[in-house]
């Protein structure tokens, strides 16, 4: 039996992070979490690399936009599947390299379907 797909969940709000982590775990994903972009960046630089990242954009310390700039500049990470989960709306253009978006408040079924369809996980 293969191991579950590893998702790195990057979300600064603890309640949202816990809810999404619990949901993804129930859906069969292995989940690691980061509370800001800097923690996520530090995690992405270690092995094993996640199969996908769920990324909030509006965070303290390092935003999702800043994290994506680092990811795009890294030859080993630039193809990493990233799905934005954000309430930022269309106020700013999405960072380059984003495969899909799921708006907040998160529809859990839409999140699962997006991961399955766009990222090929599940």
Image (spheres, grey):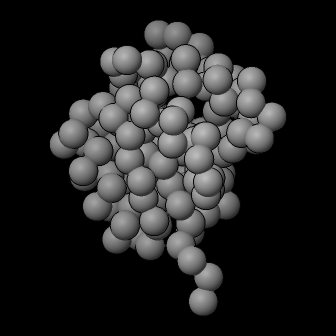
Q: Position of residue 62 (x, y in %)?
A: 44, 19
Look at 43% across and 33% down and name the residue there.
39
Is 108 positioned to the left or the right of 48 in the image? left
**The C terminus - image quarter:** bottom right
**Can residue 93 be seen from the camera position used here?**
yes
Which residue in the rendered view is the most extreme toward the left?
A: 15
Which residue in the rendered view is the most extreme toward the top?
A: 91
44 relative to 28, above or below? above
Look at 69% across and 44% down and name the residue there.
80
Which residue in the rendered view is the most extreme toward the bottom?
A: 1
Is 84 positioned to the left or the right of 76 in the image? left
Is 89 positioned to the left or the right of 119 in the image? left
Look at 45% across and 19% down and name the residue there.
63
Q: Position of residue 85 (x, y in %)?
A: 44, 36
114 relative to 36, above or below? below
**Can residue 117 be seen from the camera position used here?**
no
Q: Position of residue 66 (x, y in %)?
A: 55, 17
Which quadrant of the structure image shows residue 35?
Answer: top left
Look at 32% across and 52% down and name the residue there.
20
Q: Position of residue 76 (x, y in %)?
A: 77, 41
Which residue in the rendered view is the most extreme toward the right?
A: 75
């Amino acid at each position: 039996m293969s191991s579950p797909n590893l998702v790195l969940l990057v979300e600064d709000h603890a309640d949202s992070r816990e809810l999404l982590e619990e949901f993804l775990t129930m859906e069969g994903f292995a989940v690691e979490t980061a509370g800001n972009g800097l923690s996520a960046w530090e995690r992405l630089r270690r092995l094993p690399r996640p199969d996908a990242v769920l990324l909030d954009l509006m965070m303290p310390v390092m935003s999702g936009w800043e994290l994506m700039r680092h990811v795009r500049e890294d030859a080993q990470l630039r193809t990493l599947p990233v799905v934005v989960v954000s309430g930022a709306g269309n106020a700013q253009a999405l960072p380059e390299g984003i495969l899909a978006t799921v708006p907040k408040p998160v529809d859990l079924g839409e999140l699962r379907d997006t991961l399955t369809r766009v990222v090929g996980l599940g």
